[in-house]
Amino acid sequence: MITAEDYTALTYLEAPEAFSAILPMAEELLHARTLQQYRREDIPEVPLTIFKQALALQVAFMDSRGIEGWADPAMMTAGVTLGRFSVHSGGGSSVQGAAMELLAPAAAALLPTLMAYARAWMGGECP
């Protein structure tokens, strides 16, 4: 949905080396969180721009964590133990907590706006 040039225009950063590998995963995460509403072709310009901003932010977030970790879901919930101290991501086995760790905080902040636009053009049918 965005190109490397779009990414640069939206984030003021050069597109990451792994941009083409990260983009499909980032896009699927956002489509899942927006209930697939942004797969449509008749999206108004303002919400489409916000979706693209969220997508660029998600790509940047995923790149900052490294492409290798996103390919292996076990890496996302991994922890570390040093002596008698352990730290584990996800705060237990919460599926919702693990899902939120996948989403960039800046992209997550745009979700209410994206869903409000989706509800508006769907006539309130979007959950």
Image: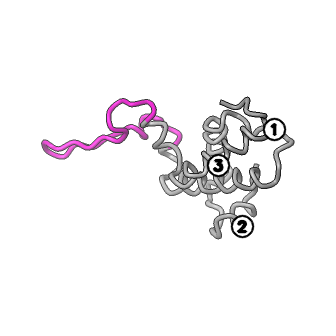
Q: Amino acid at mark 1?
A: Arg
Which residue corresponds to mark 3?
Answer: 113
At 73% from the left edge and 29% from the top edge, which residue is drawn?
125
Which residue corresponds to mark 2?
Answer: 9
Image location of residue 72, percent across then percent down: 48, 37
Task: Depth check: give the residue in front, 124 or 57.
Answer: 124
**In the image, residue 126 lies in the stretch drawn in magenta:** no
Label 3: few (<14), some (14–19) or many (≥20) C-alpha neighbours in 10 Å:
some
Which residue corresponds to mark 1?
Answer: 40
Total number of numbered labels? 3
Name which quarter of the figure residue 14 lies in. Answer: bottom right
The magenta stretch is: 70-96
- Mark 3 → mark 2, Cα distance in angstroms: 21 Å
At 62% from the left edge and 48% from the top edge, which residue is drawn?
22
Image location of residue 15, percent across then percent down: 65, 62
- Mark 3 → mark 1, Cα distance in angstroms: 17 Å
Q: Earlier in the sequence, mark 3 or mark 1?
A: 1
Image location of residue 102, percent across then percent down: 50, 43
